[in-house]
Image (cartoon, rainbow, N blue to C red):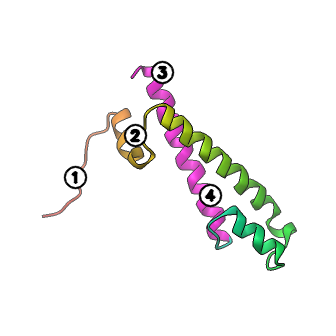
Amino acid sequence: MTDKTKAKAIVTLENLRLVESEIFRIASKHTIKTVYELDKLIASGKLSEEKVGEDLFRLDHLISEKVRLEKELKRLSIKKSDAWKSLQDLLELPRRNFQTS
């Protein structure tokens, strides 16, 4: 892997981490798992669109961004399930063993 490809992979992994954490924050705030659940809460009148409108649009955008970043990782031959291991390898971090005897 070239240095340029390695840098792209590191940035993509970090951006995916940030996007996923923001998705989690918004979902937790409204106790939902998907943008459709938030949409249903608004449609049923349990939440007002004025109150959550910005979160709805932000969540929708973040989910699109997550899909784009996951495609980029796939193109770079990095499995999302191995993201942390891949990041450690790309950054050449030492392996830590946190198991206790």
The segment highlighted magenta reads 1-29
> Pointers 3 and 2 in contact (CB under 8 A)?
no
Relative side of 6 to 12, left or right? left
Query: Residue 59, position in %: x, y?
Result: 70, 56
> Pointers 3 and 1 in contact (CB under 8 A)?
no
**Label 2 packing within 10 angstroms: few (<14), some (14-19), many (20+):** some
Relative side of 38 to 78, left or right? right
Q: Which residue bears the numbered disc 4?
A: 23
Q: Identify the residue shown where x is 59% and y is 61%.
A: 24
Q: Which residue bears the numbered disc 2?
A: 87
Relative side of 65 to 82, left or right? right
The mark closer to the camera, 3 or 1, is 3
Q: Identify the residue shown where x is 65% and y is 70%.
A: 32
The mark closer to the camera, 1 or 2, is 2
Q: Which residue bears the numbered disc 3?
A: 4
**Label 4 packing within 10 angstroms: few (<14), some (14-19), many (20+):** many
> Pointers 1 and 2 in contact (CB under 8 A)?
no
Amino acid at the residue labelled 1 = Asn
Amino acid at the residue labelled 2 = Leu
- Does residue 27 show up magenta in the picture? yes
Relative side of 45 to 73, left or right? right
